[in-house]
Image (cartoon, grey):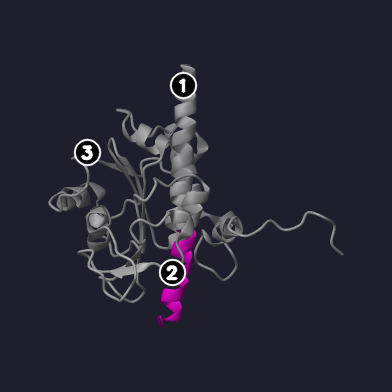
Amino acid sequence: MSVSAAEQKVREDLAAAYRLVAHFGMDDSIYTHISARVPGTQDQFLINPYGMLFRDITASSLVKIDLEGRILEPTDHDVNPAGFTIHSAVHAARHDATCVLHTHTVPGVAVSSLACGLQPCNQWSLQFHDRVVYHAFEGIALNHAERERLVADLGPTAQVLILRNHGLVTLGHSVAEAFILMHNLDRACKVQLAIQATGQPIHPVAPEVAELTARQYEGGDSNRVAGNPDLYAREWRAMLQRLQPAAPSHWRD
């Protein structure tokens, strides 16, 4: 299979994101998806082969589909079109979303099921202060009619969507951004549940400090790599190292 250099890069990043989701225990057997738009297109996407564990996904095994989940190129794999309902809705409405990542982690589902939702109670959660939107649970996401309501709840700019009683969704201008947002969001949920489990009052953060923190995350000056506009490039490069054997710890001249 011959692909452009741009598509090859997206394929490699997307396969790495699948493996990192598995590495951090954020996968759910063969369910959920991470989808990425094929560079230079508005209606072609890459997604996982249905039935393959996230840990085993490679750049070449990813399947190219359209907005209806139809396979566009010869492949030995198939996809789960019904599982693409959420992703197709987001990609069709939000052309800024290069990558859409959806999880069913235990802390994510737990927080999605709390009436209070995500709380501004820790530094990770403050990244998302006033930047989270919610969509009500309508059953397993198989009904294409739900897409219109989901898109309305998502709106034109949100990058974090909590599906009530279901799970978490992040949108990224890059695969790296979608993954790192999800990684931080899931950790924010874990910390919130740990705090709530103590039964003690949550120490409040002043709204102006919460907003400042969110803007600091968005600025990302300390994370930027010279010459690279992607503020997630430095952390993504480090994340990719988790998929490689650890470097030896002995002294090297």
Q: Which secondary structure class fits the magenta region best?
A: helix
Q: Is residue 239 visible?
A: yes
Identify the image quadrant of the N terminus.
Answer: bottom left
Pick whichever of labels 3 and 1 is earlier in the sequence.
3
Amino acid type at mark 2: Arg
> Residue 10: x, y in percent?
43, 69
Q: Residue at x 48, y 68 (%)?
A: 12
Amino acid type at mark 3: Phe
What stretch of residues is rendered in magenta? 1-17
Q: Residues within 10 Å of mark 3 (few under 14, many from 20)?
A: some
In the rendered structure, find residue 213 and report the number of the disc placed on it: none
Q: Residue at x 44, y 55 (%)?
A: 54
Q: Nearer the viewer, residue 79 or 164?
A: 79
> Residue 184: x, y in percent?
48, 45
Q: Nearer the viewer, residue 124 or 139?
A: 139
Q: Residues within 10 Å of mark 2 (few under 14, many from 20)?
A: many
Distance CA(mark 2)–CA(mark 3)? 31 Å
Q: Is residue 126 visible?
A: no
Amino acid type at mark 1: Ala
Distance CA(mark 2)–CA(mark 1)? 40 Å
Identify the image quadrant of the C terminus.
Answer: bottom right
In the rendered structure, find residue 197 and report the number of the disc placed on it: 1
The residue beneath circle 3 is 137
Pick whichever of labels 2 and 3 is earlier in the sequence.
2
Q: Say left or right for 81 vs 2.
A: left
